[in-house]
Amino acid sequence: MPGASPTPSRTLEELETDTARATAGTTDDLEVERVPGPLPGPLPEPRPEPPGEHRPPADRRRHGLRLPRGLGFSAAVYLATRIPILIAIVVYLRSHPRQQLWSIATLRDGWWYLKLANYGYSDTLRSPATNLSDTAHSYSDWAFFPGYPLLIKATHGVTTLPYLPSTLIAASVTGLLAVWAMYLLGETFGGVRVARGSALLFAAWPGSAALTFPYSEGLFLAATAGSLALLLRRRWIAAGLLGAVATATRPTGLALVAAALVVAVVAIVRERDWRPLVTPILASTGATAFVIFGWVRTGDVMAWRHAENLWGQQLDFSKELVTTFGRMLTTLHATLASPPWRTQLIGTLVMVFGFLGLVAMAVALWRQRHRANLALVAYALVTTFMIIGYSAVAPRPRTVLAVLPGFVWLAAWLPRRTLIIASSLLIAGLGLLAWLWMWAVIP
């Protein structure tokens, strides 16, 4: 106003400036730094939380019980992929009314694992014919490694259940752990997306029916996938200890020793680091202990290898398999007219499916060659050689399941939509293969 003193106007401007600065100072720390001069006083100490007061939701989540990383997803995938197997069991039992659920545990290899858990190994390469049937006497229990029978025995001791349910419990739990270990291996290789795809493809692959039945695949694959994941993370001792479990469970564990040895040699040459050498040394102790035990028990230092010969597992680079398959194709009409040959033809076609799975894994590796890991490649190559080199082993879906890096490479290569479609189709084959296994077509 005309004639008014300028002092009140200037005072109002100063008050507005001071108010703006004080307001800005309370918003965030960056604004505080813009205020010249010291802060007006010390900050008040936080009020202690009264007893019984509930924490905010974020704190409850942070301090609450949480599942290990990836275990929840792996459990969901494992349970979902067991549904077609349960359907196959129901269909099989309805078509075979004389069979019972527990009799499934005594089919094929399950019979031998139960025998070993109950009575242990025989003193000779072949058990006495008075203790076994003539058919079983022609083979040898020394062809089976002790890892899974020891787990059955431990499950029996902890649960006090009979051996039959103990073997199914052991197979189911280790099957879940195998899917989880595949998740961790995929995560180590390529993150969460690859981890989920690896676990899904692995659990949906038709050969994963062996993770439900009383076979040693669950324990072996859980230990092997976990060891490979730890090997990629350079945790040498832990990788070696899990590797020892793998080599004490199946002879394919020797591929893990080879992979760890390759990594150790490269580390020694390039980095002058001798620490990785502990992994193959520890991993080989499982198989070494079994060989020494067989030598002491039977007097035969090559008891396991000689037992394999009794089972017809000899290195012939799949010559017998290819010859049999070619003979069946040239006499297809007679093959279909003969029930035993018809069964063998179905089994051979399933092996062709397993071989196509190996081809798909090789293509995925080639497409992912820029990020290929030496340990995974070495393990996959040795495992594939052991599968293809023996006609009695052959590329069945069950044996291809051991090529763990292949599922990781496929998960990293395939688009998400393609991966889901492929997994859905494989799950259907999972139920079919489970039924064929109970029908005694696929050993």
Image (spheres, rainbow, N blue to C red):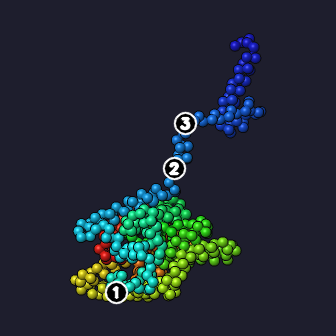
Where, quadrant-wise, is the C terminus in this rendering?
bottom left
The first of marks 1 and 2 along the sequence is 2
How would you rate the neighbour count of disc 2 (Cα within 10 Å): few for under 14, some for 14-19, many for 20 or more?
few
Where, quadrant-wise, is the N terminus in this rendering?
top right
Can the viewer see residue 421 in this picture?
no
At 46% from the left and 67% from the top, the residue drawn is 154
Residue 75 lies left or right of residue 5; in this view the side is left
Above or below 31: residue 404: below
How would you rate the neighbour count of disc 1 (Cα within 10 Å): few for under 14, some for 14-19, many for 20 or more?
some
**Type of residue at label 3?**
Gly
**Type of residue at label 2?**
Leu
Mark 3 or 2: in front is 3
Which structural element holds mark 1?
Answer: helix
Front residue (pair 161, 135): 161
Residue lying farthest top?
3
Front residue (pair 159, 287): 159
- Whether tag 1 and tag 3 are in contact, CB under 8 A, the answer is no
Can the viewer see residue 342 in this picture?
yes
Which structural element holds mark 3?
Answer: loop
Which structural element holds mark 2?
Answer: loop
Residue 419, x across and y down, in percent? 42, 63
Q: Where does label 1 land, which residue?
A: 324
**In terms of image quadrants, where is residue 273?**
bottom right
At 77% from the left and 33% from the top, the residue drawn is 37
Q: Where does label 3 land, which residue?
A: 52
Residue 3, x across and y down, in percent? 74, 11
The first of marks 3 and 2 along the sequence is 3
Measured Cα–Cα span from mark 1 to mark 2: 56 Å
Residue 251 lies left or right of residue 346; in this view the side is right
Mark 1 or 3: in front is 3
Q: Where does label 2 land, which residue?
A: 65
